[in-house]
Amino acid sequence: MNELAPVRLTLLRKQFGEGVALDGISLTLEPGEVFGYLGPNGAGKTTTIRLLLGMLRPTSGQAQVFGLDSWRQPVEVHRLVGYVPGESALYGRLTGRQHIAFFDHLRGRDDRAEATALAARFDVDLGRPARTLSRGNRQKLAIVLAVMSAPRLLILDEPTSGLDPLVQQEFHALLGEYTGDGGTVLFSSHVLGEVQRVADRIGVIRRGRLIAVERLQELRARSLHRIRASFLEEVSAEDFAGIRGVQDLSIGDRSLRCSAPQYALDALLKQVSRRSVIDFECAETDLEETFLGYYGPGDTGSDTVTETHGGETDAG
Amino acid sequence: MLASLFTKTLYDQRRGLLGWSVSLVLLVGMYVVLWPSLRDQPSMSDFLKQMPEAFRYLFAATGADMSTPVGYVQVELLSFMGPIAVLVYAIGVGVAVIGGEEDHHTMDLLLANPVGRTRVVLEKFTALALGTFLLAAVTGVSLVGLGSFADMNLPAGDVAAAMLHLALLGVVFGALALTLSASTGRTGLSRGIPAVVAVVAYVVNALAPLVDWLDPFQKLSPYYQYIGHDPLREGVDGPSVLVAVATVAVLLGLAVLGFRRRDIAA
């Protein structure tokens, strides 16, 4: 079972000259999961992915795909993997149909029917040269090329950064069907919002180190709720301060404000309802904020994480 | 056309190949048109004879003689313009097929398919070699074909032999560029080094008869393998072909080793 893990990184390390791009990463993906690989730009996401595809030679450690060594057995690995590169680079002069024919040949398969269906689903014009397509359409074509051969593992390097929300939704649905059929997905992004609706687990990489791996469900359970209540009578801080998990408590003139995770809500509500309540508000903060609360905006990429925050996160 | 990596590489070169073919036909045509007027001017041959020896060796081939069609073609086309055209094409393709593809960020896309790096190098080289032979063939056919309009009566067999050697010269330098680009991924360096080597090889071959200390190096020059035995008069030279083929084989081996060892640029 362990040998057949779709992805297994063991103390993977990569140095470019003096610079350490990856500093000993160990990670195992489970079959059928979508793993969100998060980190600011330059943290090492693309380096990890390219080591996994055998494009780069590990300085030490090992990257394996279904038990195959990525550097020593790249051809066998590539047979099992569909890849969407970060640059969404394509052959500018070739049309979508020509890309499909070429890749079919390289893979020794005939996936034209599947590719045509996928292209129709994502509304990609297969008759136009890639360089005349918009960034989003090139990305969609790259997705079609990666998925058409029904690989067992999909490795996606920021696949949705150029896609509009509707297409992203369709893409998420596709990933759902794909994992439903037993496929596994490694999905990198610099924003949690891009992966939070599809990922089962997320890993956070920063400056070449994997600083956290967790189930999204658990992160959700820890996500804070903002609570405001106003009362008919005076309340005192002591009544609420003792509740486990309550943060940022501030007591005003017959009012209360605080943040609390899910597990603290019951105790808090019971405490609140002992008074006469005029008004009560409870709003869940979005996951991105929780995430940043735990892992901080980071030193190198604070701008990337916070800037993009909010665009996609509120819809979930 | 996209049924293999080999044909895809040729397909990528189609504009380049067409452009170079048209240019070479025009170049040959121009020399053919000029021939009748030059033929009637014996002073051209005198001019060559009066040149300082070093210049004659540098700019014309051994036994330069502008009074016969064979001598004329040898001086004008084979010793200078022909090799330049073929080398520029072959070196350019050698650089483009590996380093160029990395510069365009498509190498990841290609290599993410189940094709080994060895196969990538070999198929791309095969396309390079075929393209180079095609250009030499176009030159040869237009020499014989267009030459007949001006009664040049070039011997087709010897022209073919000269073109074979010309193509091999191009393939040697194309393979050098391919090896450098496969082992380093750096396009500037992979273009520059073969260009410098080509100039040095040219000068060594041309001046070796005049400069004693260059003499031992002459036979190492790919130009010597190309034109040292006077292919337009003597036909194919087996040993020269062998040396060129062996050089290419060694370079290809190094290209495969170099490409398999290194990190691909994103």
Image (spheres, rainbow, N blue to C red):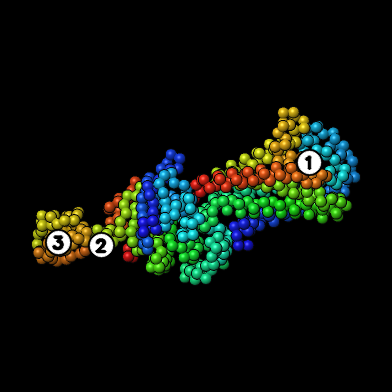
Assess disc 2: are there few (<14), some (14-19) or many (≥20) residues with their C-alpha within 10 Å of its C-alpha: some
* Dot 3 and dot 1 within a common chain: no
Judge depth for marks 3 and 2 and give the one in front. 3
Q: Position of residue A37 (x, y in %)?
A: 37, 55
Type of amino acid under label 1: His
Q: Position of residue A71 (x, y in %)?
A: 47, 50
**Residue, x 34% and y 57% (percent of image)?**
A202
Q: Which mark is residue A92?
A: none
Disc 3 to disc 1, how far (Cα)?
99 Å
Secondary structure of the residue carrying tag 3 is helix
Compared across the picture, whether A148 is left or right of B32 comes to left
Q: Which mark is residue A267?
A: 3
Circle 1 chain? B
Q: Which mark is residue B229?
A: 1
Type of amino acid under label 2: Glu
Circle 3 chain? A
Q: Which mark is residue A284?
A: 2
